[in-house]
Image (cartoon, grey):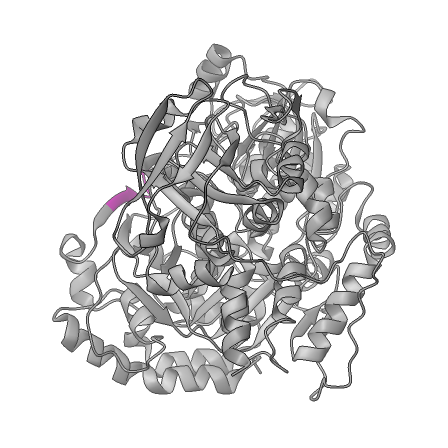
Amino acid sequence: MAFDIDMIKKVYSSMAERVDAARDIVGKPLTLSEKILYSHLWDGKPTKAFSRGKDYVDFAPDRVACQDATAQMALLQFMQAGKPKVAVPTTVHCDHLIQAKSGAVADLKHANETSSEVFNFLESVSNKYGIGFWKPGAGIIHQVVLENYAFPGGMMIGTDSHTVNAGGLGMVAIGVGGADAVDVMAGMPWELKFPKLIGVRLTGKLSGWTAPKDVILKVAEILTVKGGTGAIVEYFGPGALSMSCTGKGTICNMGAEIGATTSTFGYDDSMSRYLRATERADVADAADQIKEYLTADPEVYANPENYFDQVIDINLDELKPLLNGPFTPDLSTSVGTDMTKKATENEWPLQVEWGLIGSCTNSSYEDLSRASSIAQQALDKGLKMKSELGINPGSEQVRFTAERDGILQVFEELDAKIFTNACGPCIGQWARYSDPKNAPKNSIVHSFNRNFAKRADGNPNTHAFVASPELTAAIAIAGRLDFNPMTDALINEDGQEVRFEEPTGWELPPKGFEVEENGYLAPVADGSGVEVKVATDSERLELLTPFTPLGRDIKGAKLLIKAFGKCTTDHISMAGPWLRFRGHLDNIANNTLIGAVNAFNKKTNFVKNQFTGDYGGVPDVQRAYKKEGVLSVVVGDHNYGEGSSREHAAMQPRHLGVAAVIVKSFARIHETNLKKQGMLGLTFANESDYDLIQEDDTFNFLDLDQFAPDKQLTIEVVHADGSKDVIKLNHTYNHAQIEWFDEGSALNLIKKQNAK
């Protein structure tokens, strides 16, 4: 029996009527993405057609999922919303605060000791407000969601950018900031600009060393890290039908790396098999009753150019295994000679020190089984590991089943380290170095999704390459970045030349899934008597104080930093050791923008204090401005805020007194997060005006009193020599979002409305 089966059946009961109405209104056949969007309108049955990439639309998601690092701030905000219980099914998953170091047992014990205050808070607040709670060690949020909550045709949001993983089960699942989640948990509509649509037609069939991971690595190469911004990517074609459900999940998961709103696949037999294997035959049976509504209309896939804004063709018969990286997930290289050439030219270390398999992207039973087939070959052929190997199973159900079937033992015989069912190195929770900043130049290969500098281990010199689990295993065994398992031989302990055969594995466990304790705690029916405790002297948790509106008269704001080049949410609010402060806004604000590169000196965390002329850390300078009651401005480059959905990257600057972030372009989630926190997220009308900004600049907003949708704003930039530049700025605020600004934050508005 599935969780929330009544809710799922309710969604299905209205889907046909709503989709039929939408088809009539739009006047043409519909993609799957459109069917899900139009069937989840806040107002119910569709009454108008929406313009892609232009219209803001209110939606009613079916559920919310939160991971422990972001859940803290989301739930601290929800506690202010004035609601006794969440309005939609919601879950919290403890997977981010477990550091990988010694192995599963020791690492989980350490996490429970060091983060008990946070885990207890999350458990108690979940219990109070009717939220399902998954304990530390239960698994990685997105694998657990796929196994238990995702369903074809549904819509969900989650406080993690890789919520999109649920697209593998035919959902429209979208990563958001915690303030967006609070909207939905509080029973409010959730707003999204109606996405554009990118279709990816998959022909042929995966075979040999090529895996679903290679599909999304190829798409990332084609679209780059920002090519999917504002769009849903919908995969279809015979290649999609031949792929497993968890393979589809892998592809959707890394859609976050191309900036896509989400990615999805139409309902098919692989999804039905997965639902039934994970004890959700009731969902599969219900989906089968309306299956034509859970995929695109036939005309769409027959002539996709007529229905998508962009169509990409990938022939799986011709696709080769890829390695993407380093430092960006869209730099794609074919294994073997191409990598040898590129690595040599760019001085990438060819020796591989670690291979890492897991993360929410590739930690399914199928992934582990295919990687273990390579590990077993190494044992059988007398090969020893030339690199170290780490494994993070996706859930306790996957781990227990893989252990029962001997898969984990194969890795252990190769001296691999089995880490906790948690994110671990993928999000920087990896105790690899005692002094990561001064660690040596090296290469690692992993089956994760992100490979920004310092992402996994805090070492700016670690060159991280993204690959499939089976390729990761082979390269880790060989110990060389340029190893091609399809053609290259290795020398075993007996001096013999041996080669790998193609990987094999199981889509689903032959004996079925099994688990003794899945780690789930259901909330009590009535949580009114549950007390949520937050100690006043806590370093980890802090009750929130509502933000004060910035007002329409912003003058004399100082430049805090002009960021040079890539500035992701990792640069704005680092993870790793800082995760421990995710529930304490003032403490975590001490990492604000410390990873951003100052355009004027090309250093990180070293900016000029305009009051003293001295240089200091970004948060220190900002606190000095805040103490004097002076607001500040952050200036950035393209795709500012790329990466994780963490709203801390918006809340921290807001807390410290940043009034506006002015950039060439934004990543979608971060722009929304800035709006939610009552800030100004603006873009240069003329991108070259970025070059006009000088180190000692002061900003005066000239017409903020006329702030309105589709109306440019004007700023006066006063330079140190008294000269001035007047610059035009664009924005995407609508009337509701301008109201968030005027009230100080979206949460302030929700609280005000609930008080009526």
Determine whether, in the image, residue 30 is placed left or right of residue 615: left
Residue under the image location 53 percent in, 47 percent down: 644
Q: Is residue 14 above or below residue 96?
A: below
Q: Quadrant of residue 342?
A: top left
Determine whether, in the image, residue 203 is placed left or right of residue 190: left
Q: Quadrant of residue 224?
A: top left
Indicate yes or no whether the magenta region holds residue 432.
no
Residue under the image location 29 percent in, 43 percent down: 314
Residue under the image location 43 percent in, 82 percent down: 285
Do we see residue 312 in this rendering?
A: yes
x, y percent for residue 55? 26, 62
Q: Depth check: 158 or 690 in front?
A: 690
Indicate yes or no whether the magenta region holds residue 317.
yes
Q: Is residue 432 above or below residue 671?
A: above
x, y percent for residue 731? 33, 48
Q: What span is colored magenta in the figure? A: 312-318
Do we see residue 376 in this rendering?
A: no
Q: Depth check: 518 or 754 in front?
A: 754
Determine whether, in the image, residue 550 is placed left or right of residue 621: left
Of the 4 image quadrants, the one containing the N terminus is bottom right
Residue under the image location 58 percent in, 55 percent down: 364
Determine whether, in the image, residue 527 is placed left or right of residue 297: right
x, y percent for residue 60? 41, 75
Q: Depth check: 315 or 85 in front?
A: 85
Q: Is residue 738 above or below residue 615?
A: below
x, y percent for residue 13? 36, 87
Total number of numbered discs in the rendering: 0
